[in-house]
Image: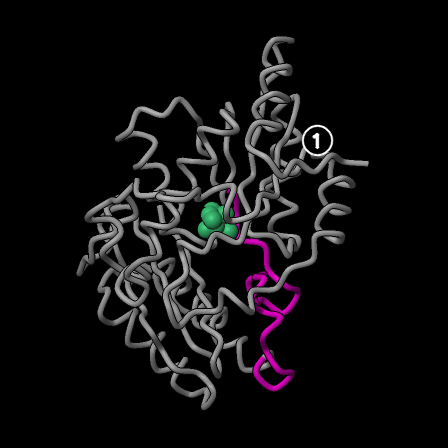
Amino acid sequence: MISVATKVNEVREQVKKWKKEGLTVGFVPTMGYLHEGHQSLIAKAVEENDKVVVSIFVNPMQFGPNEDLASYPRDLQKDSDLCESTGANLIFHPEPEEMYTDGFCSYVDMSVLTEELCGLSRPVHFRGVCTVVSKLFHIVTPDRAYFGQKDAQQLAIIKRMVLDLNMDIEIIGCPIVREEDGLAKSSRNTYLSSEERQAALILSKSIKLGQTLVEGGETNCAKIITAMTDLIESEPLAKIDYIKIVDALTMQQIDTIDRPVLCAMAVYIGKTRLIDNFIED
Ligand code: PAF
């Protein structure tokens, strides 16, 4: 059975032993309720490293006051089975008190990249992400860490943080994993009723439309966004938070596609906020 460590020191001791033996360590940070998207990250980590650590921690610091911290889905048994069957070696599953001890007051805060897209509607989110990922990196000290392209802004932010703060960790982005009908896999898909689940397909349809326009040679961002917006608005259960095209490295909005870009959206389907994106190199 895969071991589950709940204490920082247990992880440190295990990783130290592995490193003494000259083994490489891959790391997949997650908030649990794992699906095939997470599984693809773990599988890649297993392929590229001798040992793999998966963290399962619903990080309170990255949720705003009116967000879904309390209702975020959890299933440690199912997650452990998935980690084990995919070849991971250790799960780190701390309590919030283990990560944020009494008097905690140190944060990793990033400007510029965090101020666009999801950062606008989730103002505390990326500070929470950068802080917890830094802590996890210090605890696990991996050679490589794996993040999904579905959270494209998060991936760009983590890459920038590692560069800016001289963290000696290779960050590897992995492609979005979709359901057969196109919906991007997400732990939050479980919030959707069957009617909403059907309506949620409008995100991937709109992403496909945007991608087709770009691949067909359209470079005018406003035109692409208008076409994608019109399609989303044809779905009565959908409410757009944002649809934007930004520079893939800086996350700053652009008018013309003349460099690698990220086209990203956040859309409410009922009360559930879903994200999706495509990247054009
Ligand atoms: O992408 C996630 O699940 C979380 O933001 C992460 C990276 C595990 C940090 O809590």
Taking the image as shown, residue 268 lies to the left or right of residue 1, namely left
74 falls in the magenta region: no
Looking at this view, name the residue that lies furthest to the front: 102
- Quarter location, residue 12: top right
- Quarter location, residue 41: top right
Q: Residues within 10 Å of mark 1 (few under 14, many from 20)?
A: some
Residue 148 in sight from this viewpoint: no
Residue 27, percent from left and from top: 56, 33
The residue at label 1 has a CB less than 8 Å from ligand 1: no
**Vertical arrangement, residue 28 with respect to residue 69, above or below:** above
Render colour scheme: one colour
Q: Which residue is mark 1?
A: 89
**Vertical arrangement, residue 174 with respect to residue 246, above or below:** above
193 falls in the magenta region: yes
> Closer to the camera, 21 or 96?
96
Q: Which amino acid type is marked by label 1?
A: Asn
Residue 216, percent from left and from top: 36, 61
Residue 179, percent from left and from top: 64, 64
SS majority, magenta: loop
Residue 74, percent from left and from top: 64, 60
Residue drawn at x 40%, y 51% as measured from the top left:
152
Looking at this view, name the residue that lies furthest to the right: 1
Q: Across the whole image, how many numbered discs are drawn on residues? A: 1
Quadrant for the C terminus in the image: top left
Looking at this view, name the residue that lies furthest to the bottom: 236
Q: What's the magenta region? A: 174-196
> Closer to the camera, 194 or 96?
96
**Vertical arrangement, residue 97 with respect to residue 255, above or below:** above
Residue 153 in sight from this viewpoint: yes
